């Protein structure tokens, strides 16, 4: 390595051995916030996974005696199977969502996208929000297809055609974009951007 190469801990140490610059405080804060965001994302997705695992495991339990006379055995079994299929899909969804979130944050994709646009809070923020909405919609398209067109249809709950399904997905994307960008514009307006 070159003599002027420094790792982050050495750089921080060299800064603290002298008067600390405000940029160091900002860098440390940014690192801490990034770690917290990643930690919260992992914890949230992990919690969803554990919940779905417990719910899926409990689907094999027999009908409780106190409600056995209330539910028809066939209907109850069908509901448990439907619920188990939804839990499996939800577990896959949580893993995929976690992977996409960590990948976008770890590879600094949002900063790269924001850098394409001119400096200014509004357009960079719009670009990041739009990118997130599009990536989320594309990832969820396959999962929504399995949920609506396979699982729901398997149990007789779906009468949706492919055309209607795709139109619904497009509408959801447009609504997400409008509901995300509208408040952002209102929040940034007082800042003069």
Image (spheres, rainbow, N blue to C red):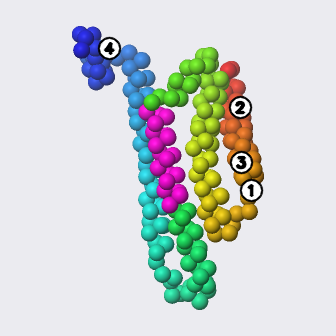
| Residue 86 painted magenta | no
What span is colored magenta in the figure? 88-106
Q: Position of residue 28 (x, y in %)?
A: 39, 26
What is the CA distance from the residue labelled 1 to the residue labelled 2? Answer: 38 Å
Q: Is residue 71 left or right of residue 1?
A: right
Q: Is residue 91 magenta?
A: yes
Does the magenta stretch mainly form a helix, a strand or a loop?
helix
For residue 166, the mark is: 3
* Disc 3 to disc 2, C-alpha distance: 31 Å
From the image, state whether disc 3 or disc 2 is nearer to you. 3
42 shown above or below 177: below
Q: Which residue is mark 4?
A: 19
Quadrant of the rendered structure where residue 18 is?
Answer: top left
For residue 57, side relative to residue 110 (left or right): left
Q: Residues within 10 Å of mark 2 (few under 14, many from 20)?
A: few
- In the displayed structure, would residue 58 be above or below residue 4? below
Foreground tag (3 vs 4): 3
Q: Earlier in the sequence, mark 4 or mark 2?
A: 4
- N-terminal of the pair, mark 3 or mark 4, is 4
Judged from the image, the secondary structure of the residue bearing numbered disc 4 is: loop
List x then y, in percent, for residue 169.
Answer: 70, 47
């Amino acid at each position: 390595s070159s003599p002027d190469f420094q790792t982050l801990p050495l750089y921080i140490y060299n800064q603290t051995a002298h008067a600390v610059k405000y940029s160091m405080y900002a860098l440390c804060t940014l690192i801490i916030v990034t770690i917290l965001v990643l930690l919260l994302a992992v914890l949230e997705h992990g919690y969803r996974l554990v919940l779905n695992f417990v719910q899926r495991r409990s689907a094999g339990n027999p009908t409780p005696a106190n409600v056995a006379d209330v539910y028809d055995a066939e209907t109850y079994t069908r509901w448990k199977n439907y619920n188990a299929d939804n839990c499996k899909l939800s577990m896959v969804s949580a893993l995929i969502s976690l992977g996409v979130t960590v990948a976008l944050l770890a590879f600094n994709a949002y900063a790269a996208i924001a850098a394409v646009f001119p400096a200014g809070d509004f357009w960079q923020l719009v670009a990041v929000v739009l990118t997130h909405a599009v990536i989320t919609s594309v990832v969820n398209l396959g999962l929504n297809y399995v949920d609506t067109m396979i699982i729901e249809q398997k149990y007789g709950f779906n009468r949706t055609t492919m055309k209607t399904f795709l139109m619904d997905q497009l509408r959801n994307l447009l609504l997400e974009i409008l509901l995300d960008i509208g408040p952002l514009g209102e929040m940034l307006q007082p800042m003069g951007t």
